[in-house]
Image (cartoon, helix red, strand yellow):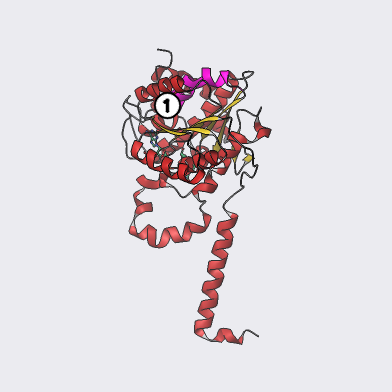
Amino acid sequence: MFSFLKSRPVFWASVTGTTVGFAFFIKDLMQGEKFVNPIRAEDKVVIVTGSNTGIGKETVRELASRGATIYMACRDMQKCEEARDEIVLETHNKRIYCRKCDLASMDSVRKFVESFKKEQVKLDILINNAGVMRCPRSLTKDGFEMQLGVNHMGHFLLTNLLLDLLKKSAPSRIVTVSSLAHTRGEINIADLNSDKSYDPGRAYNQSKLANILFTRELAKRLEGTGVSANALHPGVVDTELFRHMGFFNSFFANLFFKPLFWPFIKSAKNGAQTTLYAALDPELVSVSGKYFSDCNLKDVAPAALDDAQAKWLWAVSEKWTKLNN
Ligand SMILES: NC(=O)c1ccc[n+]([C@@H]2O[C@H](COP(=O)([O-])OP(=O)(O)OC[C@H]3O[C@@H](n4cnc5c(N)ncnc54)[C@H](OP(=O)(O)O)[C@@H]3O)[C@@H](O)[C@H]2O)c1
């Protein structure tokens, strides 16, 4: 019956066809749950940080197609304007605005909030999406280790400065994009800023754990206000996040590694689905302090349930960002 496979070209064509077909099948499987609720967002004012590329940009695209008014809070204005133009052209939603917000500068965060409050009297959804991963050691303008500074401290200050508006706009939501990397995270109480020793992976994991500790403590503080705070893991997504990881951008990785892992990686559009779910799903209106992945509730690592550590981190973040000054 399979005698035609005795011909070498036919055999290899058959093996290649089956492998490619299987790879596409796995790829499709790995794209995760989609947020399929067609809910519109014409009445929503939304801020998305780090939205000129990757998951943030796809989040803006989807929210724009649902009619929301969106502020793209970015550090690179040229990239932001280019992304905005593309999305406006595609969705015909002109209520998308680019505003400078460098999370590596507390001064820039404060200026962003000040100008936002002059433009808008409400804020329905804040999406803390921006992130930097495994960069060489460097410091933010305020002297914070870059990953802790951008991923946690910048979002800590931004969120807190916007709380009055979020409360006024309740029911409103705060969505923070964390990562599964939090499960490998540890809050280094003795050296939070990695001043004594720096490991890029450990600093990233710590910052993503900080995202969840912050979210859970924030949710407690917001009880009864109608403002929810949730965190999420978007999946392993094909974005620019890996830009600092030399190996991923090497010739060898492009030739062998990436094709091998291609089936297991989500597109940025699919990586944005859990963010959209947390931001828009009507069933989550009173769900707070939780963590999602693939548009479903997920458990966090034991370290993320440490309430004493969450309180400690809050107190340190308040002091370092000079929140109350
Ligand atoms: N991709 C994944 O597999 C994955 C997995 C788990 C979690 N995540 C999380 O998903 C979020 C989005 O990342 P992504 O995958 O979409 O990566 P990305 O394509 O690199 O996007 C990151 C965004 O953050 C912005 N950003 C970096 N530093 C900033 C700063 N100082 N101020 C303001 N914005 C800044 C970047 O702006 P520039 O372009 O100007 O640098 C970019 O727009 C991150 O929080 C990341 O930790 C991603």
The residue range painted magenta reads: 153-170
* Residue 171 drawn above or below residue 65: above
Q: Which residue position is annotated with label 1?
A: 153
Residue 129 position within the rendered picture, expressed as x and y whole percent measured from the top left: 47, 35
Q: Can I make out residue 90 in this image?
A: yes
User: Based on the displayed image, in which of its 4 quarters is residue 76 positioned?
Assistant: top left
For badge 1, the amino acid type reads Met
| Quadrant location of the C terminus in the rendered image | top left
Give the camera-side residue of 261 and 104. Answer: 104
Q: Nearer the viewer, residue 51 or 320?
A: 51
Residue drawn at point x = 65 percent, y = 29 percent: 285
Please identify the dominant SS of the magenta region: helix
Q: Around disc 1, counting alpha carbons within 10 Å, would you say few (fewer than 14), some (14 to 19), or many (20 or more)?
A: many
Q: Which residue lies furthest to the top in this view?
A: 325
The tally of labels here is 1
Location of residue 84 in the rendering, given as x and y in whole percent from the top left corner: 43, 40
Q: Is 248 situated above or below 135?
A: below
Q: Quick check: 299 left or right of 48? A: right
Image quadrant in which you'd find residue 258: bottom left
